Amino acid sequence: MSTLEMQSGHVRAVVENALLHVTLDRADKRNALTGAMYQDLTRSAEHAGENDDIRALLIDAEGDMFCAGNDIADFAGASAETREAGSAGPALTFIKALMALDKPIVIAVQGQATGIGTTMLLHADLVVAAESARFFTAFVDLALVPEAGSSLILPALIGRQNAARLLLAGDVLTAEEALRMGLIAYCVPDAELAERAGALAEKLCAKSPTSVRYTKQLIRHGLGSDDVHGQMDREAELFGERLFSDEVKAIMEKFLSKRRA
């Protein structure tokens, strides 16, 4: 496996038992993301995709706040050239790297998740949030507009009115509201966040990587589609491929051996 080296000094990454665990480590600045941090996060997602030994990606953060969004100083210091190249900026490059990763992504959230701290969650497979978590996009309050595909994904995920609460009204959603809407998968006590998120990521690492990859692809392909017949055909094709694989045959033989015993 190639070595994963972080450059920003504010992102840590460690591989253990097939899990790539990435931690935002800028708690004194509420884990606001800089260009260098985005590059480290992109590097991490790409590293996970390039290495078969890695089966899942877990992203969490130090301190009381998950992420305060983009570092305002980076925004304020942007040049005209940076603005013209905004579609290929470091934040969007990171989001696209998450989208391209065909391995499960778990994100653990505590305290405030602001701006891209919320919108990056739309590209995770499972989000575990502490009861203290709060979700806020802030774009309209900065006279900006949504990013990371949130204007498309949020209405489809949590409904138009709830999306408007985040993107237009600028409401702050509690963890309980986010769970009810479907923005997050689990809401847990703050003291249990690290343990629960880690256990979930390790659980995913233990599953068949091919089955997990295909399932993630199917879920992604089906988002926003009403082509039920086409999706059924895609499922059937992959189901048949897996059914006759050596991996599935071994699992079934083990199960049948237990029944015969």
Image (cartoon, rainbow, N blue to C red):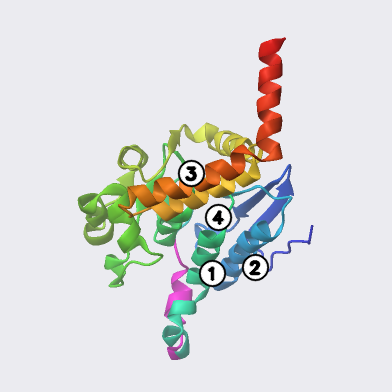
- Residue under label 2, please give it: 8
Quadrant of the image for the N terminus? bottom right
Cα–Cα span, label 1 and label 2:
8 Å
What is the span of residues highlighted in magenta in the rendered image? 69-80
Q: Is residue 49 visible?
A: yes
Q: Residues within 10 Å of mark 2 (few under 14, many from 20)?
A: some
Disc 3 to disc 1, C-alpha distance:
44 Å
Q: Earlier in the sequence, mark 4 or mark 1?
A: 4
Sequence-first disc among 3 and 2: 2
Pick the residue in front: 204 or 36. 204
Residue 257, position as x, y percentages in the image: 71, 17
Q: Which residue is mark 3?
A: 236
Q: Nearer the viewer, residue 49 or 164?
A: 49
Please tell me in which quadrant of the rendered image residue 18 appears.
top right
Q: Tell me the number on the disc at residue 34.
A: 1
Whether residue 41 is situated above or below residue 156 in the rendered picture? below
Report which residue position mark 4 lands on. 27
Q: Residues within 10 Å of mark 3 (few under 14, many from 20)?
A: few
Distance in Å between CA atoms under marks 3 and 2: 45 Å
Circle 3 or circle 1, nearest the eye? 3
Looking at the rendered structure, the kind of residue marked 2 is Ser
**Residue at image coords 37%, 67%:** 147
Picture coordinates of residue 55, whole percent (x, y):
66, 47
- Is residue 106 at least partly visible in the picture? no
Q: Please tell me which residue is depicted at 51% across the width and 47% down the height of the picture.
A: 237
Give whichever of discs 1 and 2 has the lower sequence position. 2
Q: Are marks 2 and 4 in contact (CB under 8 Å)?
A: no
Q: Is disc 1 surrounded by few (<14), some (14 to 19) or many (20+) residues within 10 Å?
A: many
